[in-house]
Image (cartoon, rainbow, N blue to C red):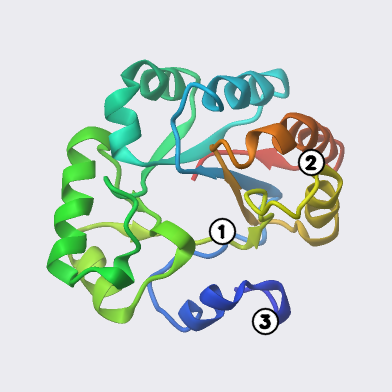
Amino acid sequence: MLLPQERIPAPLRRAAFLREVLFRCDPDVRAVYLTFDDGPIPESTPHLLKMLAAYGARATFFMVADNARRYPELHRAVLEAGHGVGNHTYHHVPPMRQTVNEMMEDVGLADGILHSRLFRPPHGIIGIAQQKALVAAGYLPVMFDLNVRDYHPGRTATQIVDTVRRHVRPGCILNFHDSLKSIDKLQTALPEILRMLRDMDYRMDTL
């Protein structure tokens, strides 16, 4: 089940017709799924891990494999804390700028480091040919049900919290970012979001 069209970013609306792409988990289970794209990096990931641990929350980190290669200790720290890891490509090149073969080569290179069947394309954009190739290779493309847009320079921590408060629902896959663009806002917003979700009796689990 997808979000109403006005709650899906424009690139995601164009992808919403795709089959075999996960946008939302079981709506009959009172759980939500926090995801973080683009890490791991030392300026952000340790702070996220500390905040998640404080509230007993588990999440899924869609990693850029080149970052995981450069910071293997952070890759290990995410796994050792009980979080999940997904493939966010090796070079973070949007699939629509590549041929299918180029994209699959990049994804396969990332898989050699990340070892995950979960895949999220950079910028949340994927075409039919890319989707078919990924599924044929055994990957599950994962998008999101709610994008908080924490990377946007015009967004504040208060707006991020309010977006989650207004739109979270059972089975929701929330999209955050493990990045320099987001961490200052998440230092304030994420603890408040985690408290709110806990008070709403949501389980925060991995995909």
Examine the image and state in which quarter residue 34 appears: top right
Q: Is residue 7 above or below residue 44?
A: below
Circle 2: residue type: Leu
Instruction: Classify mark 2: helix, strand or loop.
Output: helix
Please provide percent x and percent y for residue 197: 79, 41
Q: Which residue is mark 1?
A: 25
Count the marks.
Answer: 3
**151 vs 107, nearest the viewer:** 151
Crowd rating for badge 1 (residues with CA inside 10 Å; few <14, some 14–19, many 20+)? some
Image mark for residue 197: 2
Outermost residue, front direction? 153
Which is nearer the N-term, disc 3 or disc 2?
3
CA distance separating discs 1 and 3: 18 Å
Which mark sits nearer the N-terminus, 2 or 1? 1
Q: Nearer the viewer, residue 102 or 147?
A: 102
2 vs 1, front mark: 2
Reading the image, the residue beneath label 3 is 5
The tag earlier along the polypeptide, 1 or 3, is 3
User: What amino acid is found at the position of numbered circle 3 in the picture?
Assistant: Gln
Q: Is residue 160 left or right of residue 66?
A: right
Q: Give residue 25's position: percent from left, percent from top.
A: 56, 58
